[in-house]
Amino acid sequence: MTSGIDRHTIPGTGTFFVGIDVVPGRYRCENGKGGWWVRFTGKGGDMPVGMWPLPPGPAEVDIGPADFAFETRVPTSWQLISATPEGEAARQAARPSVDPTLRPELDRMVSRRRPLLRLTPMTALAACLVGFMALGSWGATMLIPLTLVALFSRQMSEDAYRARALRMRRDRYVTPEDLDPEAQELLARAQRAVQTVLESQVHAEGLLDAADNALTLPQQEWETAQTLARQSRLRADQAEILAAGVEPQVEAALGPLRDKLDLAVQAVTRRIEALEHYADRALAADQAFRAHQQLEELSARAHEYDELLADAIRDELAVPPLHRLAEQGDALIATLRSRLVEAAEAYTELPDE
């Protein structure tokens, strides 16, 4: 769910899950004319709070850390203007991790229900027509508010259905509450590494073309989160058994199980370290790429320096500095290529799915 979405910007149209797609905080859109929004509050989003229609001009909304989802229909996008303390911490701490295939699945489910949901406003319009014929203009006027409510309730029904479907797929996402502190820290490391690569300039420019990061990295994060959740449950089970008091034979039997759990933790830690290594190589490639861009800008203006030197000294004195500039460019291009190769090699170190 997180891939391809800037967690500090909310597109004008869609349903977005708090903590997964967006961070909590105050958001602002420059023009909300005729649009609306719904915050799904309460446990599992069963207490929607909305505002419609929005007046012309800027609009703001506060999305709380306890909100389940945010649904919006406005002409422009929403921008984060101030994060809540919880939202600020969420950028460094572990956040929910979701099966990348879940959002398309929910969208398909809602899409299949839309023909039925469209019947509601059509029924209300038919009621207005019957009211006009039976009661005249006064009757139709009384039914117009019902039509408006039906138009909005259709979308509200879609969102409520999406929220219910998400709750029924609890095994398809992991929240920080599913993890103990040790697992939360490991997941946060993995998520920071994935975010670093996906936000890198070389990724945006398509220079890491050997790796399908947008598909592979979210899947790597999801598999890591699942493993960490299982490890957290096993550690909790062991702690519960020990807290109740056990006989020496039981304590001895727990020893090999703890050893296996330790080996599993080491394995997932190596996966996370591979992600971090890949992120470091992407950052190094970013630095070389930015330097390459800066040198290209200097090279584009080299003729100005040539003209300046030609005005003051003989032409031949201007040649060596320009040659040195070209040599620096060649060297930097070689460095960039080397960094991209290192990033590609780091990607191959990631475990297979």
Image: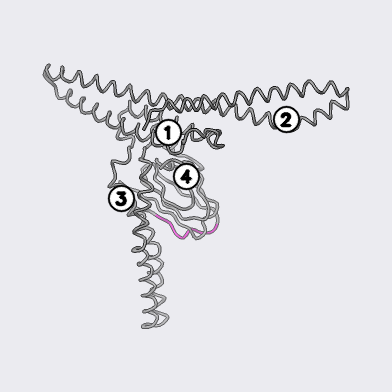
Label ID, residue 165? 3
Q: CA distance from mark 4 to mark 3?
A: 27 Å
Query: Which residue is more in the foreground, 259 or 243?
Result: 259
Going from the N terminus, do you reach mark 3 or mark 1 first? 1
Query: Which residue is the site of mark 4?
Result: 26
Label ID, residue 299? 2
Residue 95: % across, % down: 38, 36
Residue 86: % across, % down: 41, 36
Q: Main secondary structure of the magenta part?
A: loop
Which amino acid is tagged 1?
Answer: Ala
Going from the N terminus, do you reach mark 4 or mark 1 first? 4
Q: Which residue is at a point 48% across and 28% down the rendered structure image?
A: 279
Circle nearer the viewer, 4 or 3: 3
Mark 4: secondary structure:
strand
Circle nearer the viewer, 3 or 1: 3
Residue 284: % across, % down: 55, 25
Going from the N terminus, do you reach mark 3 or mark 2 first? 3
**Stretch of the chain drawn in magenta:** 50-56
Residue 115, above or below 25: below
Residue 64, above or below 222: below
Going from the N terminus, do you reach mark 2 or mark 1 first? 1
